[in-house]
Structures are given as structure tokens and as C-alpha cells.
Amino acid sequence: MTENKIFKVALLGVPFDDNSSFERGPALAPSKIREVLNHGSLNGASELGVNLRESKQWLDAGDVNIAPSDNFIDEIERRCDQLLSENNRILTLGGDHSISYPILKSYRKAFDKITILHIDAHSDLYDSFKGNRYSNACPFARVMEDGLCERLVQVGIRTLNLHQTEQITKFNVESLEMRHWPLSQPLVFEHPVYLSLDIDGIDPAFAPGVSHREPGGLTSREVINLIHQINTPLVGADIVEFNPNKDIDNMTAQLAAKLVKEVAGKMLIAI
């Protein structure tokens, strides 16, 4: 993909949670986040000065219709291929975290070199979980096996077991655990960045609407600052694992909508 062309950021919903390893509900997230984005309580402005409601580079690309669910990889990859071929960059609303694998398969075809910034409480590096190699606990094992990035940096991790630690070593993942937070120096990237943002990377005090609440996470402000401080082009992103069934007074829905604005704003500004 040519970097200097004018592009659009396409908001793509993937209402899919068949690979959830614990509780279903993230399939409801895309419609809920759109509802908040379009509600009168918010304007369209991001902190970086981009107003999505006024930008001609912002579009809603609708949802990927996945039926039957065993075709989820092909269906997501095909839709992303189409959007990228039309000079869009994609901000995807999940859905469970399994959707990141087919999205990144598509991105690998569009960008020669890419770094993944993965914000999450969990490493999602299981080789298989409960007999499912495409579980939401496994996407980054598949990503690394397929060589879909030059570098995987994980932030917010706070649930590592022995198998996950072995996988981190096997795949040379940079896993920055919360027990060592804050970082001693800012993250620096050499290649375009794809952001995969699991809402449970944020502390449940700020984001209770997740299936796996893991205390001790990042604050909303820390995540927004991480997004703003990315020093190379942000060329794609997914926001996953918001479970509206677990939310409290729309707290997590409001945060997810805020994150959409900040991620889209970062994708649209010139580096």
C-alpha cells in the first residue's frame, strides 16, 4: 500500500463471539459502540483535533456477516482485503479477540512491514485452549506462527502462566507486564503500527463490561496516552472483547466510543 495517498479510515463491525473461551456477549459490542458514537451526548472530536463527524476520510463500512461461524477467518479476511484494496485503513469493532488473526492476515498482504501493539490483560498466546486453536485465547500464537508481523509488543499483561511464558520466549514477544509498570522509557517503533486493543487490558474500575475482569490494569488515560504517543503511522486497529452484558451504566460503552475517536484521530493525522 502506498503511504502517501489520501486514504479513509473504515469502521468495520465484526459481531462475532463464537470463539469466546468464557462468556458470550462481545458480538453485541459493535452496535452498542455505534449507538454511543452517534448519541447526542458526544461530539465527534478527538483530542488530537480530528472531528470524525466532519471528516471526509471517515466512513462506516458496516458489519461482516459471518455465517456459518466455521468460515469466520475467510469471511473477515475477504472483507478486509476488499477495504484495504480500496485505499482504506480499518478500525474494527469486535467481537472476541479471535477476529484479530484474519484481520492481520489481510494486513500482511497490504503492508511489507508491520509492528503489532497489543494492549491486553492476557497474552492470547495459547497454542490451543479447550481444544480450539482459534479461541480468543490463541490469536497471537497463530499470528506469530504465520509471520504476520516483524514485532509484537504486549502492554498490560498480568495473567501469565508457564505455557504462555514459554510461548513468549518461543516467538520472541516483547511482553511488558503490569507488575513492571510504568515503563522506564517510551515505546519506540520502526515500522507502521497495528493496534489490537482488548478492553480488559484496562482496569475493571474503568471498564467493567468485559468477560474476564482482571484487576490491576491500565487506566483509561494511560491507554489514550499510549495511542497518542505512537511514533510511526497507525495503519489499523481493532477494539475487542467489550461485553455489553457485563457493563455497568454504559461505562465501558462510553470508554469504547472514546477509544474509537482517539484511535481514528491518530490514524487520520499526519505523522
Image: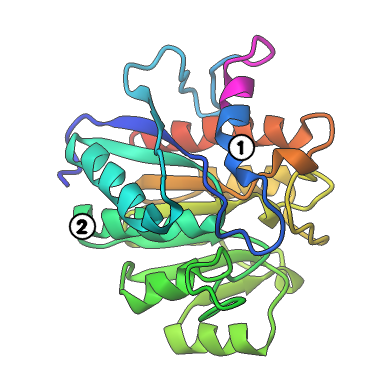
Where are the magenta residues, as a range?
34-42
Residue 271 seen in render: no
Q: Which of 127 and 207 is in front in this view?
A: 127
Which mark, by number, is residue 109? Answer: 2
Secondary structure of the residue carrying tag 2 is helix
**Residue 96 part of the magenta segment:** no
The residue positioned 46% from the left and 20% from the top of the image is 52
Crowding near the residue tagged with mark 2, few <14, some 14–19, many ≥20 C-alpha atoms within 10 Å: some
Picture coordinates of residue 67, whole percent (x, y): 41, 45
Q: Distance between the residues labelled 1 and 2?
A: 28 Å
| Farthest-out residue, top | 40
Q: Which amino acid does label 2 sit on?
A: Lys
Secondary structure of the residue carrying tag 1 is helix
Left or right of 215 on screen, residue 75: left
Mark nearer the viewer, 1 or 2: 1
Q: Which of 32 and 239 is in front in this view?
A: 32
| Farthest-out residue, front | 68
- The residue carrying mark 1 is 29
Q: Which amino acid does label 1 sit on?
A: Ala
User: In terms of sequence position, does the residue under pointer 1 or pointer 2 come before the other?
Assistant: 1
Q: In this view, does 153 lie above or below 51?
A: below
Picture coordinates of residue 83, whole percent (x, y): 26, 37
Picture coordinates of residue 13, whole percent (x, y): 46, 36
Which mark, by number, is residue 247? Answer: none
Quadrant in which residue 39 is drawn: top right
Q: Mark 1 touching mark 2, by CB under 8 A?
A: no
